[in-house]
Image (cartoon, grey):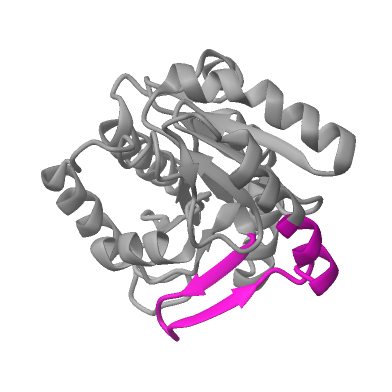
Amino acid sequence: MIRLFVSDIDGCLAEPYQPYSLAHFQILAGYARAAGGVHEDGRSPALPSLTLCSGRPYPYVEAMTQVLGLRVPVLFESGGGLFDPVTARVTWHPLVTAELEERLEDVRRWMRTEAIRGTRMSYDIGKRTQVGVIGPDPAEVAERVPLVEAYVAEHHPDMRVFHTPVSIDVLPPGIDKREGLRWLGERLGIAPAEMAYMGDTNGDLEALSSVGYSFAPANATPEVRARVDVVTRGAVIEGVLSAYRWCIAENERKAA
């Protein structure tokens, strides 16, 4: 059975810098309400519980959690932190140490003073366990990716660089979406084979390969679309709804 459905936010629930599809959000919130928490009494076993795994910082992911009425802990900063909406508590990944934060601060200073100098890009405020910059021009973002990769390879070779059309993120070793899903699964008592994940860019690839059921919306990158179990016909949140309904049908088929 698919017990947990996990979705990325940017490129899946919404496009960066674009209005939300509120009607689709209402439908997804209805599913989240009906599915409830993983261990809540009276829930339908055919409905996977819903949660999020995003590179966005805590405040944004917490707001999305409230909008959807989620009852399952969510992952922010690509698994660097976990927020439980039931207890209203934040837990940081065990690998977040003072030494790691000092190294991230070095990358942060360089990103602010060198990587985005002379561009329309800005520092992604509010992140603790990774370093990110964002910008509205995909061509400008893409042009800066090799510069960031070169700096990280020289000064922090164990860190990794991920990017989307509007962002570049530097993640420390051991903190990524795949590790975040493993951490979440351990807390909830859910095996990776019982999870479904929806992602759209290279930062999602490892997480997609670690779960039992992998999905991508129609707007996902070619690399992601080639490596998932199901590519939905719909884009963004329409694709998320299609994937979630696929999971319901699969659970009902298995139960029958």
Q: Residue at x 48, y 57 (%)?
A: 125
Q: Residue at x 38, y 79 (%)?
A: 41
Residue 155 coordinates in the image, percent (x, y): 87, 41
Of residues 228 and 222, the one nearer the viewer is 222
Q: Quadrant of the C terminus?
A: top left
Residue 209 coordinates in the image, percent (x, y): 67, 34
Magenta span:
80-105
Q: Is residue 18 left or right of residue 211?
A: left
Residue 118 coordinates in the image, percent (x, y): 50, 29
Decide if residue 234 is in sight here. Answer: yes
Q: Residue at x 75, y 39 (%)?
A: 160
Q: Residue furthest left?
A: 23
Decide if residue 157 is in sight here. Answer: no
Give above or below for 102 relative to 118.
below
Q: Quadrant of residue 246?
A: top left
Give above or below for 57 relative to 193.
below
Of residues 165 and 180, the one nearer the viewer is 165
**Is residue 130 a member of the stretch shown in magenta?**
no
Of residues 212 and 116, the one nearer the viewer is 116
**Is residue 88 a member of the stretch shown in magenta?**
yes
Q: Residue at x 40, y 40 (%)?
A: 10
Q: Residue furthest bottom?
A: 87
Q: Quadrant of residue 61?
A: bottom left
